[in-house]
Amino acid sequence: MECEVNKNSHQNPKRNKPISHSQNPSTSMQDSIPLLPPELITEILSRLPVKSLLKFRCVSKSWLALISSPEFINTHLIVSANNKEYLHHRLMLSFVQPEYNLKDCSLGSLLYGNVTEAFDLDYPMKNPHKSVWIVGSVNGLICLAIEENDLFIWNPSIRKFKKLPDSRPMLRCGYYFMYGFGYDKVYDDYKVVGIFCIFGSGGSYDVEVKMYSLKSDSWRNVYDYQGGVLLNDSGKFVKGKLHWSTTARCAQYTGWEIISIDLTDEKWGKVEQPCFEEGNLDFALGVLENNLSVLCNYRTWADVWVMKEYGVKDSWGKMYTIRCPNDDPGKFMFSPPLCVSNKGEILLVFGSIFMIYNPSDDSIKYPELNNFDACLEAEIYIESLISPLLQNEPIPLQQ
């Protein structure tokens, strides 16, 4: 294009006429465009997606310093998290068949669009023969467990990850373990909790708990475990605490209870359950709009309870009752709701497919998702600039 313009200019002598200072287009353009104040530049950039910001770091040294600063990274995270259209939220999906894999898609498109595309993810230690488990997501960081040996804290938006040191105690046959991932706001630290249950003879068992700190890059033992055998998978992070459902440790009561651990003071606690209807049911903990939730599955329907005021039993409210849309009740299970749209509709997984339930008219629709097979689990994450690496730590190559 540039060579073409030069050629034409030689053919037209008028184009070789010198341009006076007043006629110089670049000078007049510079004079006519006012410089934006720094706070307005920050306001504009904070609303852009991470992909654009990574490119804009090359614009100038000042933009690089701004976009890389902790203040801007936190501002961008807050703006993204509060977007009601979920423009900067994505849904990560794990698959088992035909091979172990992770995909993701736009949450906003799934809720409000016609057709959504699911994309393959190149996650750390990707291997079609090794299981991958999404432990949890906080502020754009994902905790992944590969098989039972390797744990990672990973930001897929900026393609950086941190491999955690081995946490497992000396385990014998007859054991299982669960993890939880959360953020300690007081110490500005991301933490992973591992609960290892080792079964003995006669129904006895021992529990060992370890907590990892990203700041110290180390594990330490946590004592005074207050629960029974864990019933749910990953710990649910709400109000600075991780939560699990466990069997009740009480001779007079054989049901279940909700235990928690505070990531700041490392103290155990319990959360009282909602007053749900007794019967033949399965239950699962979840997080809905930053509140602790419980899904009670009665085979032909499911109730969703939400704790509006944390720690207050009377604040539990039955928010939704969803009827089983399948002719064979019990064949598929509901999963805890993932989110609520700005229209009041809730997104959840039924069996291995997504459904959107509208409580206003009790209707159900199934969003169309291309390049999608039956998923094992789904986790929402925010696109963010937060790095899982410590300062001056070398960046590993993503595998």
Image: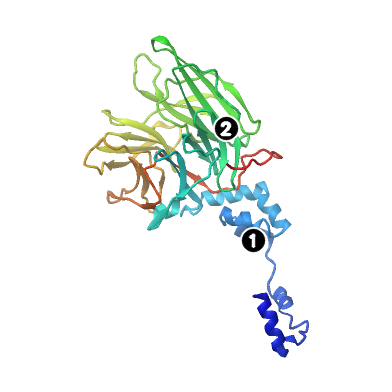
Viewer-side residue, 257 vs 139: 139
* Amino acid at pointer 1: Leu
Q: Could you tell me which residue is drawn at 40 percent across and 26 percent down? A: 231
Mark 2 surroundings within 10 Å by alpha-carbon count, few (fewer than 14), some (14 through 19), many (20 or more): many
**Where is residue 115 drawn, in percent x and y?**
39, 57
Residue at the disc numbered 1: 40
Placement of 287 over or under 369, stated as above or below:
above
Q: Is residue 342 visible?
A: no
Q: What element carries label 1?
A: helix
Placement of 144 over or under 339, stated as above or below:
above
* Amino acid at pointer 2: Lys
Mark 1 surroundings within 10 Å by alpha-carbon count, few (fewer than 14), some (14 through 19), many (20 or more): few
Q: What element carries label 2?
A: strand
Viewer-side residue, 313 vs 72: 72
Q: Where does the C terminus fall, quadrant-wise?
A: top right
Q: Could you tell me which residue is drawn at 38 percent across and 29 percent down? A: 273
Q: Could you tell me which residue is drawn at 76 percent across and 83 percent down? A: 22
Image quadrant where residue 391 sits: top right
Q: Is residue 48 visible?
A: yes
Q: Which mark is residue 191?
A: 2
Q: Where does the N terminus fall, quadrant-wise?
A: bottom right
Q: From the viewer's perspective, tell me whether residue 132 is left or right of residue 158.
A: left
Viewer-side residue, 257 vs 372: 372
Q: Earlier in the sequence, mark 2 or mark 1?
A: 1
**Where is residue 17 drawn, in percent x and y?**
75, 87
Q: Could you tell me if the residues under marks 2 and 1 are in contact, i.e. CB atoms within 8 Å?
A: no
Count of residue discs: 2
Gap in angstroms between the C-alphas marked 2 and 1: 35 Å
